[in-house]
Image: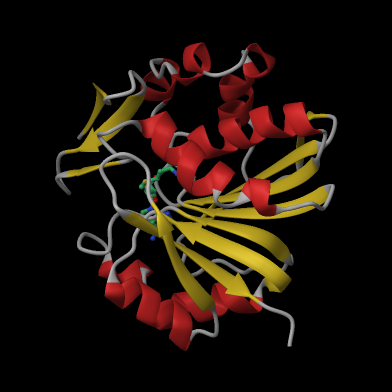
Amino acid sequence: MHEVVITKDGSHSIYVHELDEHYHSVHGAITESRHVFIEAGLKQFKNRQIRILEMGFGTGLNALLTLAEANQSDISIYYTGIEKYPLEKTIIESLNFESLTDHTVTGMLKLIHDSPWHQDVLIKPGFILKKLQCDMHEMELIDEFDLVYFDAFAPEKQPELWTKDLFSKIFLSMKSNSILTTYSSKGMVRRNLEAAGFRVEKIPGPPGKREITRAYKSSM
Ligand SMILES: C[S@@+](CC[C@H](N)C(=O)[O-])C[C@H]1O[C@@H](n2cnc3c(N)ncnc32)[C@H](O)[C@@H]1O
């Protein structure tokens, strides 16, 4: 069962009873997503054209914040989101993200969720979305990504998604000089990323989290 909850910055998140787990940090969903994925990830790029892969598309919050950033900085983005268990429409419609984000994305969350799966959809000029409904283990990654948002449930809850094997598959789908960011800084996560070929660094985290992880695929 999914329950919409309010986090400390006023933004919604979802609590999953079966897993005893939230979709985002209870210290602030939007604050966390901005910190981990936009600041530590997207804003590190100077390129004007970026391919992003999100593992765990969920509420679409990361896609929405990416769209808001793209509107401000005039970058062009091709965004692929992987999700095995799409959320119910009633839950998505109750989320308050847009009222806490800049007006350029008003109405966009609905557009994002109404987009058909497995197709390239032009959300706005310069932002193409492709949502893939599949298991992260079974996905075929044919695109070459500049940036990966790794946003699975915590390693304690879903250890099978934070493995060397899955990270290796992602590594192979990434371009040289690309970045993966994630909110977890667990030793096991860092070791598995390193075993997959990434250079890994710990960087300061958002409220409630001392450190997060940023991993690089460098040019050889
Ligand atoms: C931490 S939540 C995602 C948060 C999401 N990025 C957001 O901002 O709402 C993890 C997501 O991974 C999805 N997920 C869990 N197991 C999966 C799997 N094996 N393959 C693909 N997606 C999975 C969940 O349904 C959930 O939406």
Position of 211 relative to 74 (above/below): below
Q: Nearer the viewer, residue 106 or 136?
A: 106
Q: Nearer the viewer, residue 212 or 115?
A: 212
Residue 217, can we see it? yes
Q: Position of residue 164 (x, y in %)?
A: 42, 82
Q: Position of residue 83 (x, y in %)?
A: 47, 49
Taking the image as shown, residue 113 lies to the left or right of residue 122, namely: left
Taking the image as shown, residue 80 lies to the left or right of residue 77, namely: left
Position of 57 relative to 97 (above/below): below
Among the 4 quarters of the image, the one containing residue 148: bottom right
Query: Residue drawn at (57%, 42%), measured in percent from left and top?
Result: 38
Position of 167 relative to 89 (above/below): below
Screen quadrant of the C terminus: bottom right
Q: Nearer the viewer, residue 37 or 152?
A: 37
Q: Position of residue 10 (x, y in %)?
A: 33, 18
- Looking at the picture, the colour scheme in use is secondary structure
Screen quadrant of the N terminus: top left
Among the 4 quarters of the image, the one containing residue 155: bottom left
Query: Residue drawn at (46%, 83%), measured in percent from left and top?
Result: 194
Q: Nearer the viewer, residue 183 or 210?
A: 210
Taking the image as shown, residue 72 lies to the left or right of residue 57, namely: right
Q: Position of residue 81 (x, y in %)?
A: 58, 49
Taking the image as shown, residue 146 lies to the left or right of residue 162, namely: right
Among the 4 quarters of the image, the one containing residue 126: top right
Query: Residue drawn at (42%, 16%), measured in percent from left and top?
Result: 96
Figure label count:
0
Residue 137, can we see it? no
